[in-house]
Image (cartoon, grey):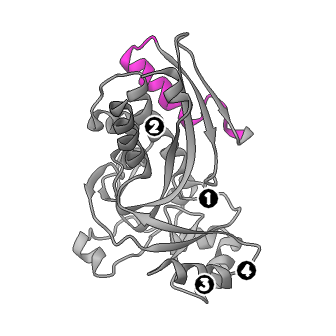
Amino acid sequence: MSHHQWADHWWPAPAKLNLMLNITGQRADGYHELQTVFQLVAMSDWLNFIPTTDGKVSLSCSANNIADPDNLVLRAANLLKERSGTAQGARIILKKILPMGSGLGGGSSDAATTLVVLNDVWALGYSEKELRDIGLELGADVPVFVLGRSAWAEGVGEKLEVIDLPEEWFVVVNSDYHCSTKEVFQHNSLTRDNSAITIRDFLNGQTKNDCLSVVRQMSQELDDVYRRFSGFSEVYLTGTGSSMFAKCCTREEAVSLSDRLPADWSKWVVKGVNESPLHKSLKQFSNQVNQV
């Protein structure tokens, strides 16, 4: 595939919402055993990958504060390069749209898009399962984005079962407060020993997120947002925060709710999707290339 075909193409790294988060235990290594439902949503960061022959991986990013060696995109690209032994390189450009530390999975999704697309750019031939295993080394939320489907998850979030959810609309509100996942999981008031539930329980309305009460204790600002938002709708927390969301049946209902919320809030109207926009884009790209 030509350099130009890759250079012209931008790849989405979609956000996720956790529709439920149930913590059932803590492992010896400190990780928490949990159950959650990942709902993919049509709101994305965007990445561009240009293959190079110099063997180097470089990243330029629209958000200045994350173009460093710890950036998950660089870590994903370098891990894939190291694992495969490829002599190829890539120039990567990241357009950051999703706020960091917001529970929307932006960094993990960026890493997954990097693994999935570079696997093609570099013609490495890894299977989706192999890429998921590599992704898990980067973070517990990476595998679901590699899978590219809304899913029921257990373990630390890596045991995935595809689940078809109603493709509802959501109003997502993000405060500027940056929730540290580590701090939330270490908090002494977090319940860590809930009974496991089933997918049927979730579908029948068990949608509690165990981190919500902890996050509200940790931040007065988030507690205020939760209280005000709850005046308009039932409100849920995604991940360990900081974003909160409401579910709506139609786009019109979501727009109407968003319009009633304070004008100075960071808020988005987004659609839930069962298939990742990245995977749809890959299929279209592959079809175009094969037709040429």
First in sequence, mark 1 or 3: give its number.
1
Does any portion of residue 196 appear in the rendered image? yes
Q: Residues within 10 Å of mark 3 (few under 14, many from 20)?
A: some
Residue behind mark 2: 138
Residue behind mark 3: 256
Mark 2: amino acid: Leu
Mark 1–mark 2 Cα distance, whole angstroms, equals 19 Å
First in sequence, mark 4 or 2: give its number.
2
Place of residue 262 in the rendered image (x, y in percent of width and height, measured from the top left):
73, 80
Magenta highlight range: 65-87
Mark 4–mark 3 Cα distance, whole angstroms, equals 12 Å
Task: Return the residue found at the far front.
Answer: 292
Q: Is residue 248 above or below residue 128?
A: below
Mark 4: amino acid: Pro
First in sequence, mark 4 or 1: give its number.
1
Callout 2: SS? loop
* Disc 4 versus disc 1: nearer the observer: 4
First in sequence, mark 4 or 3: give its number.
3
Report the disc number at residue 179. 1
First in sequence, mark 1 or 2: give its number.
2
Callout 1: SS? loop
State the residue in front, 280 or 223. 280
Residue behind mark 4: 262
* Disc 1 versus disc 3: nearer the observer: 3
Q: Is residue 36 magenta?
A: no
Q: Quadrant of the C terminus?
A: top left
Question: Label 2 near label 3: C-beta < 8 Å?
Answer: no
Magenta stretch prevailing secondary structure: helix
Is 205 left, or right, of 242 in this rendering? left
